[in-house]
Amino acid sequence: MPLLYDLGKLTVGTTLRVGWQPRVEGLEHLPRHGGAILAGNHLSVADELFLGCLTPRHVTFWAKAEYFTGRGPRGWLSRRIVNGMGAIRVERAGGRAALTALDAAVPVLRSGGLVAIYPEGTRSPDGRLYRGRTGMTRLARDAEVPIIPVGVLGTVEVLPVDARLPRRHPVTLRFGPAIPVAGRIDGPRDIRVVTDEVMAAIQRLTGQEYVPRYAPPRAPST
């Protein structure tokens, strides 16, 4: 576990556990060893904080490329943080550049790590659960790992988009049974079927209304 991640779990994680007393359900579905993808709904930037501090194992997250290339004191600090946390760089320009993030996650998973993915591709604009993107399933196939659905409730009230400081509100994190991928993918249709199965599992954990279309992208600044 990267040192900075360990330190953050001790400091920020303790603050979240003591201050918000979040409820965690289904930890028995989280494997003690071996690689797996944690696929969750995405309501707030607080999702990563609670998932990271409440998961007993190290979780690798993605971070936008700008955090790795910033200049000046602020850029230096962001580079130290994302590298110290073991984050995977994501190019948001799309195309082949964006796929390098998936490529970088394969060795992490094959070496027995956990990687968090938000298959909606962006935070929900209205609290509903949107159609999942298939990169998650392709990654699980390539790395030969299962997908564990994760549902989070309450984080949008803790840290809304326009909030400067977090607010007190109950938070619940739920892990569902692992969804196997190995041996199930023979073509694009199978990838879509498994992706939809994961989204249905997330919906059962959260009770969100499901929207069978992709969520609208947010502005780059958010």
Image: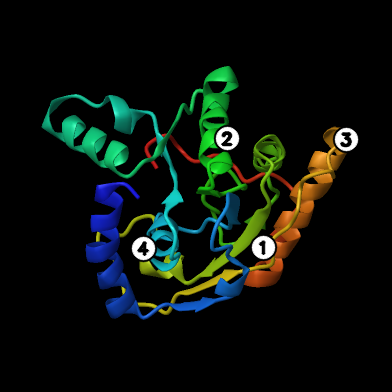
Q: What's under tag 1, amino acid-wise?
A: Ile
The span from disc 1 to disc 2 (Cα, nearest Å) is 23 Å
Disc 2: CA contacts within 10 A as few (<14), some (14-19) or many (>=20): many
Quarter that holds the C terminus: top left
- Badge 1 marks a residue whose secondary structure is helix
Q: Nearer the viewer, mark 4 or mark 3?
A: 3
Query: Mark 3 and mark 1 in contact (Cβ < 8 Å)?
Result: no
Q: Disc 1 or 3, which lies upstream in sequence?
A: 3
Q: Disc 3 or 2, which lies upstream in sequence?
A: 2
Q: Disc 1 or 2, which lies upstream in sequence?
A: 2
The residue labelled by disc 4 is 159
The span from disc 4 to disc 2 (Cα, nearest Å) is 31 Å
Q: Nearer the viewer, mark 4 or mark 2?
A: 2
Q: What's under tag 3, amino acid-wise?
A: Asp
Disc 4: CA contacts within 10 A as few (<14), some (14-19) or many (>=20): many
The quadrant holding residue 109 is top right
The span from disc 1 to disc 3 (Cα, nearest Å) is 24 Å
Q: Nearer the viewer, residue 58 or 196?
A: 58
Q: Tell me the residue at 42%/54% (across/down).
A: 58
- Badge 4 marks a residue whose secondary structure is loop
Disc 1: CA contacts within 10 A as few (<14), some (14-19) or many (>=20): many
Q: Tell me the residue at 58%/26% (across/down).
A: 99
The residue labelled by disc 1 is 202
The residue labelled by disc 2 is 106
Vertical relation: 27 (above or below) 211: below
Q: Can I make out residue 73 in this image? A: yes
Q: Disc 4 or 3, which lies upstream in sequence?
A: 4
